[in-house]
Image: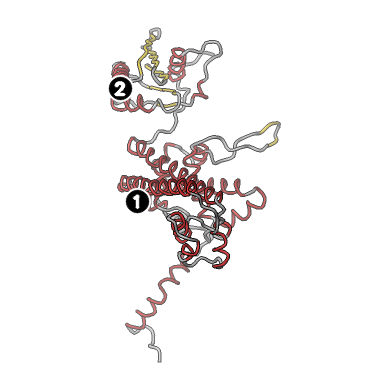
Amino acid sequence: MDIQPIFRCSVGIDVHLALICVCIIVADPGMEPTVYRREFGGFKRDRHAMAEWIAGFKPDIVVMESTGIYWKSPYAALEKAGIRATVVNAQHVKKVPGRKTDTGDAEWLAMLARAGLLRGSFIPPEELRTLRQVGRHHQKLTAMRAMEKNRLIKVLSDAGIRITAVVSDAHGVAASAIIDCLLDGGTPEQALAHAGRLHAKPEVLLASLQGELSADHVLVAKTIRNHIGFMNIQLADLESHLLDALQPHEAALQLLMTLPGVDRLSAAKLVVEIGLDMAAFGTSGRLCKWAGVCPGNDESAGKRKRGDTAPGNRYVRTVLCEIAWGAVRTTSQFKGRFQNLVSRRGTKKAIIAIGHQLLRIVFVLLSRKVPYKDSTVDYDALVVKRNAPRWIRQLKKFGYLPQAA
């Protein structure tokens, strides 16, 4: 059976670093389809020329596939020309073996689009699409800072300083002050004065600080320490910019912050990644599949086998895992479910399962515009506990309750 067209004019675009292949298929009623092919460069002038050429045909549908992130600039050029393109997954449009060329890819895309056989990927609005860069760089910079902190501890351990053996957080306020004192030329006895409220016994802490710090150790450790301080400033700037830019969407951030484990920054990162319009995903299951936090399907001969999570948006998955770790430490439904899962499935799979559940709830919150209410929490009892003393005082003041003798 032949593929039945449903669009008059369809456009297929295959995007590479320095080459954009475009194929346009136009079929007026009662006439044979006409195919137009053209190649453009990857620079700004070429992208604008491509957008103008495509807009002249007044296409019904425009689809593109791309290598890596190279689709973003042509997509923006088409958007400015009033064309809303559809970005498709390359795995869904694999070419017939033996006919693989860039021009052939573009024509195959146009043919499939003409028949309405392609489903587009989720592309957020331009405002959130550009803010993604800020949120993702903040996430990468946070990981880099953690690596630098580990390097600093490794340098100190190389010098025989074993502060991590007696202090749970080697980067806390007191531990950082101790390390700074040592790097600035202080003795272990002088550094011990910065211990503050550390639980370690003074004699044990003093023994852990006695090592052989050479000039090379100090140079490398100071370089790492300065780098960590610089990254702290950068992270603060990125966070401030992201939160300021999302001020118009404060209501959505407040809704997400009613979830256990969600602070303003994690809510902002979720918003720029998944957007605010949940109709773009349709169902919470599709959203979880897109994020890569739900189990895969592997069923054969009526038997369900283990299905690994599919690759998805790793930035959303990272934020969800961070939120999940916070949620399981609260007195909410997530704590009980985590304790139930961790003994059977292990810590990592349990956290992914909690992240899956959290993302489904996020879908409901943003779709219905309602705050989160935990099924295991008696909110009426919390309100009474918080306000009962004030209510009783007012009732006594106005004579509705007798005054105490």
Q: Where 50 falls versus 397 (above or below)? A: above
Q: Type of residue at label 1? A: Ala
Most distant residue in the top direction: 32
**Residue bearing the label numbered 2:** 44
**Visible residue check, residue 363:** no
Colouring scheme, one of rainbow, by chain, secondary structure, one colour: secondary structure
Q: Is residue 401 left or right of residue 329?
A: left
Q: Is residue 404 left or right of residue 324?
A: left
Q: Position of residue 36 (x, y in %)?
A: 37, 10
Q: Position of residue 195 (x, y in %)?
A: 48, 65
Most distant residue in the bottom direction: 405
Label 2 environment density (alpha carbons within 10 Å; few <14, some 14–19, many ≥20): few
Q: Nearer the viewer, mark 2 or mark 1?
A: 2
In what element is the residue under mark 1? helix
Q: Are marks 2 and 1 in contact (CB under 8 Å)?
A: no
Q: Nearer the viewer, residue 90 or 2?
A: 90
x 32%, y 82%: residue: 398
The disc, 2 or 1, on the residue closer to the chain's N-terminal end is 2
Q: Where the C terminus falls, by quadrant?
A: bottom left
Per the rendering, the mark at residue 243 is: none
Q: Where 195 falls versus 405 (above or below)? A: above
x 32%, y 38%: residue: 127
Q: Is residue 19 left or right of residue 376?
A: left
Q: Nearer the viewer, residue 302 or 127?
A: 127
**Residue bearing the label numbered 1:** 251
Res. 183 image quadrant:
bottom left
Q: CA distance from mark 2 to mark 1?
A: 37 Å
In what element is the residue under mark 2? helix
Q: Position of residue 33 (x, y in %)?
A: 40, 9
